[in-house]
Image (cartoon, coloured by chain):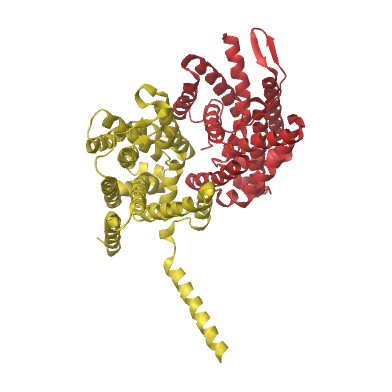
Amino acid sequence: MGFAQILANGVVLGTLYACIAIGFSLVWGVLNVINMLHGSFIVLGGYLTYFAWASTGISPVIILPVVAVALFVLGYALQYLFINKVVTAPVLTTLTLTFGLDMILYNLMTVFFTATPRRVSLDYGRIDALGVSMPVDRLIGMGLALVLTGLLFLVLKTSRIGRAIVAVRMDREAAALMGIRVNHIYATTFAIAALMAGAAGAVFAMVFPVTTNLSGVFLGKAFVICVIGGLGGVSGALVGGLALGIIESFAGVIVGPQNAITIGFLIMLFLLIVRPTGLVGVKGYE
Amino acid sequence: MSRKSNLTLIVMGLWVLALALAPTVLGNYEVRIAISIAMFTALALSWNIIGGFTGYPSFSTAAFYGIGCYVGALAQRSGVPAALAWVAAAAFVGGVSFALGAIVLRLKGHYFAIGSIALVDISRLVISSWGSVTGGGNGLNVPLLEGRPPEVSALVLYVMLGIMVLAFVTNVIVDRTRLGFGLRCIDQNEDAADMVGIDTTRYKIAAFVLSAIFPGAVGAVYASWVGYIDPTDSFDILTTVKVPVMAMLGGAGTLLGPVVGAFSFVMLEEIFWANFLEWNRAIMGAIVVVLIFFLPGGILRLDWKRILRRLSDRSKARSTDKGSAKE
């Protein structure tokens, strides 16, 4: 396999990874909560997309927004009913609570969807260019992931709610004094994160098979990406995602695919120690 | 020594005695539960040293337990007697935790939590990809302990109880010495503790190592008991969170909290495993949610006097109601 091919694979994987990690990074940065539910949200998005596609035959590109909205509602409800109540508690409490909620969601998914791998198969063939061969469905997935990432960036930068989220992230007390309803912003942030996770799951299901067992894997990736890229916004997740995608792609060829994940984790541990704010992260989100 | 701490020691002594009597009066199934209780109590007490006293959100107990499983198994496979292999596992894991502690304890808050979770995953990945030594995903067979099955389970129970008692004694010693005082200071405010001259790095590493050696030993004994280990079982993500949840269920940072928590959790788990196998994970999740919302300080920190008074008030009210109805 040539250099260009490995790099291209890494970039495609990296954009998907960025999409996976963005919501996790947002919740961590704004709510100061490590959301253990994140991996299951992604799997849920993938499964819902698959079952909607398999039972109706509608194009998954149309199903994706519907699934994303469903996850938004679920995320808002979970944050409003549970996590908001302990959001200022120590890490141990919030992390344990989200893990408990994840156990419930995971169990529900294995019962209702079973652990069979499911994939939306879009057979569009391959494209060959510049010595790189790439299945078209992966390119579509990459395009969707980039569109979603760009949309979130625009929402945070320009919309009212986006500005409010950024304000809460900077200083929650000051934001409350300015008349921002902090609890509502928290719930909305968590809901946006769930929406992005659901959409990422939908995109993932178009490219790779999804099973419930992947929820832990996705969560692990989100950890690594956030630590590599740093918290604090879309750019961190994008840089971290691309970095991890490219690292894994090359590590897979050099030391074998089963060790590629270990390399990712080792890099994360190393970065945690030498530069906990990540490559492009903002200081102060601890 | 205050009366309250004497009471703690008496309660613990009676509890150890009760568990130790299990093989003489109860059947195989109950002995297995007793082993489970002793094992998880030892783990929860170990976690208590770093998580309870120091307040560091450590999730690496499963890493130490898993490494202990493998070191014990590999030592036994190369001909080392079981007892020696267990001690070796504890010592090895102690060394590993010393080296790792120097690295991860530089992290704080969320970053420490993630770093400690990463330790579990990295250990699992290293063990599963180092197939030539560890058997990889196929796992390892561990030489069986000699003796008839009831004798073996009694032996395992006594060894686990021994580790549990050692872990408890360590908690008591930490609680009553400068180390415990220093760790509590770190929990309150690490920067301030540092400023008044507490060597926080040394204290934290000591707590981390103490919280690692017992899981190392427990893992090795577990490996000898079940006779077969593999990476997914030894480094279970559920163990990672189960152990802190047990300690918090009883009351983190207290001496008897992890004991009460581990017992309650294992019993709940047994009941749910037996009746709702398919929903096991969801029920555990629900326990966690209930714990966080209704028992934030654990069972031991409940205001028992108030609850009893309220109950007696209610029953009094009921009896006066009945009395007035008769008139």
Q: Is residue A124 visible?
A: yes
User: Closest to the observer: B70 or A254?
Assistant: B70
Q: Position of residue B46 (x, y in %)?
A: 34, 45
Q: Residue at x 69, y 20 (%)?
A: A139
Residue nearer the viewer, B194 or B168: B168
- The image shows residue A153 at horizontal and vertical percentages of 68, 31
> Image quarter for residue B102?
top left
User: Picture coordinates of residue B234 (x, y %)?
Assistant: 40, 36
| Chain A pictured colour | red
Q: Is residue A150 above or below residue A130?
A: below
User: Residue most toward the bottom?
Assistant: B327
| Left or right: B105 in relation to A65 | left
**Most foreground residue, B95 or A213:** A213
Q: Which quarter shows the N terminus of chain A?
A: top right
Of B153 and B133, nearer the camera is B153
In the displayed structure, does residue B195 sit left or right of residue A144? left
**Residue located 65% across and 34% down the image:** A46
In the rendered picture, chain B carries what hue? yellow
B138 over A105 or under it: above or below:
above
Q: How many marks?
A: 0
Residue most extreme to the front = B148
Is residue A64 in sight in this rendering? no
Q: Residue B168: x, y in percent?
A: 29, 50
Residue drawn at 31 percent across, 42 percent down:
B214
* Relative horizontal placement of residue B77, taking residue B191 as reference (left or right): left
